[in-house]
Image (cartoon, helix red, strand yellow):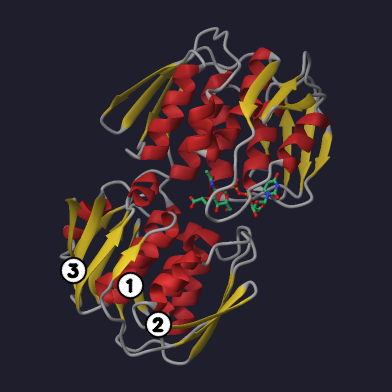
């Protein structure tokens, strides 16, 4: 059993580096299946989810090798169109291999990815989009068996701007015959990075980053080299940790425009920071105001920063309301924070937060990736010794988080029980 032991109550000083974006590199690794050329990805974080996606690509017949921060992916004419059950259930994000495998092989078979801690995570919009391109979807014994001898471009309207559905449809459409228009598409920066990557392989995608994406299918994709964009969620997490602890921390390798919703909320709450070229310098503030948060699709406030921001708000002056509009069960950090003395009340999709002067240390359990980040933030502000169990959740999305935090003076160690 691995856990973090944290002695909180210290201000943080120094510089902390942000790595490549988990939620960009996962779909981009899937998109590399479209090409039989050599793909080299740079700034790839060493995460559990990246190693699972590497295993999925290998299981389909591709070669994946890591050299430092670079991944080389070589997928010849692979003959397997079924992803292994154990890998799909380990990481539901592997659902995005459907589009590229369907485009390359005319068929894909994948276990219906289950839900996870934060919600049931259906894939109906993925399937509806692929059907619009001419695919036939069969569900048998818990497997999705999707076939499409030919994919034809279509006009597709997404009921909701789902990130994964946009990605799957985009990748299938990139190799379909004719033109596809995706309306009400997701606009996250990771979608833009995926489209840029596919275009570097010879794709013809326009409008990524807006709610209408135009994709002209092409027959062949070449290899390419691509640098993954910085992880705005890791950046936002470090900015919030620094804001909560106070001190003087420079978060490096940030694209400020990807963090506009977060920075706007820091301004509103009176938390002091400064934008500097490719970094954000955070000073915090001993007394900052409560602010309300409503998670939305991009460019709204990102759901992945809801948990750490809520943890910060437990010590704000006044009353705050945090509303989670994207996932149906993303408040599991609330009970753990209440055990530290936070004054929180869940009412439907919202949490009402009465600020308290300080939190008390406790032994805590991480329930999912971003809830784990929220607990680290809370424990770093609480005077005394806290423990966080089930930290494998954190290793999915934060590379060596305790080492990075030690680098800015945090007293956090990983202990193998
Ligand atoms: C991506 O998940 C991210 N994961 C999530 O990050 C992120 O929270 C989410 O987008 C929203 O930004 C990756 O990119 C690997 P959605 P995804 O499809 O694609 C429902 C993290 O912590 N829905 O936009 O699954 C769904 O259940 C992770 O890094 C359907 O109902 O998100 C959810 O409630 C967590 N039917 C909502 O839509 C569908 O067919 C948004 O999901 C698809 C989704």
Residue 305 on image: x %, y %: 47, 63
**In the image, the residue with mark 3 has its CB under 8 Å from the nearest atom of ligand 1:** no
C-alpha gap between disc 2 and disc 3: 26 Å
Compared with 122, 77 (above or below) is: above
- Provide residue 198's location: percent of width, then percent of height: 57, 29
Left/right placement of residue 383 relative to residue 129 reads: left
Disc 3 element: strand
Q: Residue at x 79, y 24 (%)?
A: 135
Q: Earlier in the sequence, mark 3 or mark 1?
A: 3
Mark 1 neighbour density, 10 Å: few (under 14) some (14–19) many (20 or more) = many
- Residue pushed farthest bottom? 318
> Which circle marks residue 342 in the picture?
2
Residue 58 in sight: yes
Residue at left 42%, top 88%? 355
Residue 282 shows up from this direction: no
Indicate which label's residue lies in the foreground, 2 or 3.
Answer: 2
Residue 275: x %, y % from top left = 37, 67
State the SS at label 2.
loop
Question: In the image, which is nearer the foreground, mark 3 or mark 1?
Answer: 1
Q: Secondary structure at mark 1?
A: helix
Rounded to the nearest angstrom, the CA distance separating label 2 from label 1 is 10 Å
Q: Which quadrant of the structure image shows residue 396?
A: top left
Q: Which mark is residue 378?
A: 1
- State which tag comes first along the sequence, 2 or 3: 3
What number is the disc on residue 13? 3
Q: What separation in Å lies between label 3 and label 1 (alpha carbons)?
A: 17 Å
365 or 311: nearer the viewer: 365
Residue shown at the point (53%, 12%) measured from the top left: 36
């Amino acid at each position: 059993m691995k856990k973090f032991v944290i002695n909180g109550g210290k201000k943080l000083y120094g510089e902390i580096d942000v790595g490549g974006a988990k939620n960009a590199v996962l779909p981009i690794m899937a998109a590399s299946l479209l090409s039989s050329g050599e793909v080299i990805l740079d700034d790839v974080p060493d995460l559990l989810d990246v190693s699972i996606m590497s295993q999925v690509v290998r299981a389909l017949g591709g070669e994946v090798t890591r050299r430092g921060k670079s991944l080389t992916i070589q997928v010849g004419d692979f003959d397997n169109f079924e992803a292994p059950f154990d890998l799909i259930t380990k990481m539901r994000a592997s659902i995005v291999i459907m589009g590229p495998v369907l485009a390359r092989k005319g068929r894909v078979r994948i276990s219906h990815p289950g839900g996870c801690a934060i919600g049931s995570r259906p894939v109906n919009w993925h399937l509806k989009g692929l059907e619009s391109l001419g695919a036939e979807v069969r569900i048998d014994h818990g497997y999705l068996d999707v076939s499409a001898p030919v994919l034809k471009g279509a006009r597709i309207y997404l009921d909701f701007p789902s990130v994964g559905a946009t990605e799957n449809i985009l990748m299938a459409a990139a190799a379909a015959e004719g033109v596809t228009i995706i309306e009400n598409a997701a606009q996250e920066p990771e979608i833009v990075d995926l489209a840029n990557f596919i275009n570097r392989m010879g794709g013809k995608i326009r409008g990524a980053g807006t709610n209408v994406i135009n994709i002209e299918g092409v027959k062949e994709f070449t290899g390419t080299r691509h640098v993954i964009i910085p992880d705005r969620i890791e950046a936002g997490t470090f900015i919030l940790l620094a804001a909560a602890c106070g001190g003087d921390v420079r978060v490096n390798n940030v694209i400020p425009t990807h963090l506009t919703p977060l920075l706007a909320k820091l301004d509103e709450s009176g938390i002091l920071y400064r934008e500097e070229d490719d970094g954000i310098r955070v000073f915090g503030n001993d007394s900052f105001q409560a602010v309300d948060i409503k998670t939305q699709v991009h460019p709204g406030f990102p759901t992945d920063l809801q948990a750490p921001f809520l943890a910060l708000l437990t010590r704000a002056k006044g009353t705050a309301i945090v509303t989670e509009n994207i996932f149906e069960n993303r408040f599991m950090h609330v009970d753990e924070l209440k055990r530290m003395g936070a004054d929180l009340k869940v009412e439907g999709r919202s949490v009402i937060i009465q600020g308290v002067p300080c939190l008390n240390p406790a032994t805590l359990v991480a329930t999912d990736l971003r809830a784990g980040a929220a607990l680290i933030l809370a424990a770093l502000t609480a005077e005394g010794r806290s423990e966080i169990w089930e930290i494998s959740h954190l290793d999915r999305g934060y590379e060596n988080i305790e080492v990075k935090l030690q680098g800015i003076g945090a007293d956090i160690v990983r202990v193998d029980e």
